[in-house]
Amino acid sequence: MKNQTNTKEFFITVLIKGSGYSAIFFVAIIFYFLLSQGLPTLTEVDLKTLFSVRWYPIEDYFGILPLITGSLVVTIGATLIAVPFGIGTAIYIAEIAPRWAREVLKPLIEVLAGLPSVVLGFIGIAVLASVLRESLNLPTGLSALTGSLLLGAISIPTIVSVAEDALDAVPKEYRDGALALGGTKWQTIWTVILPAARSGALTAVMLGIARSIGETMTVMMVTGNAPVLANSLKVFVSPVRTMTATIAAEMGEVANGSVHYHVLFFIGIVLFVISFIVNVIASSYVYRTTKRSEKLLS
């Protein structure tokens, strides 16, 4: 019996380790594939041309700077919208809402998180773009602002779901202790509960940002798909094109092994690196915060 138990534990341990290592393996394989297909760009396209402001592959202009700028503008706009609303909604559900409201809102948010992005894209084209064009007196409603609003709406359910779970995991004793010391409900939330759930809330924000960076269909439908570098003062109300939309729109039309083909994979490398940097920054912040908390407790 003891040998059977040890054998089961051995196989379970191997299975768990294999699952963990497989994640690293798959990421490494994906990155290797991107490098193998994208790095030839550096020998086929001059760096000045590659990081220029004109994207017109028909005439061999492969400037990816407008695509990077478009992705960053839309992602930053979506983050500025999604983070306050997402964290605020999570606080309301976890700490303020009555039980009946929580039982209705939590499943509803879970359903919204699974809403296909193409549906929001249709809503953006049919409704939001027209409203923004008329209310702001714009030449077109298909702009970075429209994309930011829709990406923010897509990211909010993810942020709410993860952040609410993190807030709910904070021990009840923290709340009772803060209230017993004379703190108000808001003071307890702001100075005790949120700091205690900081790592979970930051994870929620990072997942929301990752959803914004990687979104394709919505931004391809509502941002205007104009690979131009807009004036800095009007960048949010001007049409833009993101890196993901460029890959999705053009990958099916290029010849395998052509310069254009390799440049699209190079854009994928840039996108991969940006996502990696964001995750590293978030992980290092969580690590420093955890170490600081451990020192205070010791």
Image (cartoon, rainbow, N blue to C red):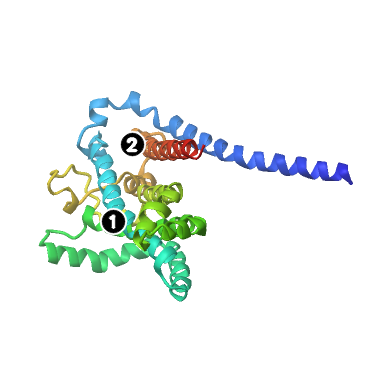
- Give the left or right position of residue 18, taking residue 218 as reference: right
Q: Which residue is mark 2?
A: 260
Q: Residue 70 appears at what percent x and percent y?
A: 25, 45
Q: Is residue 296 or residue 169 the one in the foreground?
A: 296
- Give the left or right position of residue 6, taking residue 176 as reference: right
Q: Is residue 159 above or below residue 119?
A: above
Q: Is residue 107 above or below residue 199?
A: below
Q: Is residue 71 above or below residue 101?
A: above
Does the image show residue 115?
Answer: no
Label 1 vs label 2, nearer the camera: 1
At a point 40% along the width and 56% down the height, the residue shown is 159
At a point 50% along the width and 38% down the height, the residue shown is 294
- Give the left or right position of residue 11, taking residue 157 as reference: right
Residue type at the position of mark 1: Ile
The image quarter containing residue 6 is top right
The image quarter containing residue 184 is bottom left
Callout 2 environment at 10 Å: few (<14), some (14 to 19), or many (20+)? many
Residue type at the position of mark 2: His
Q: Residue 100 appears at what percent x and percent y?
A: 46, 76
Q: Residue 167 appears at what percent x and percent y?
A: 46, 57
Between the residue at mark 1 and the residue at mark 2, the CA separation in whole angstroms equals 35 Å
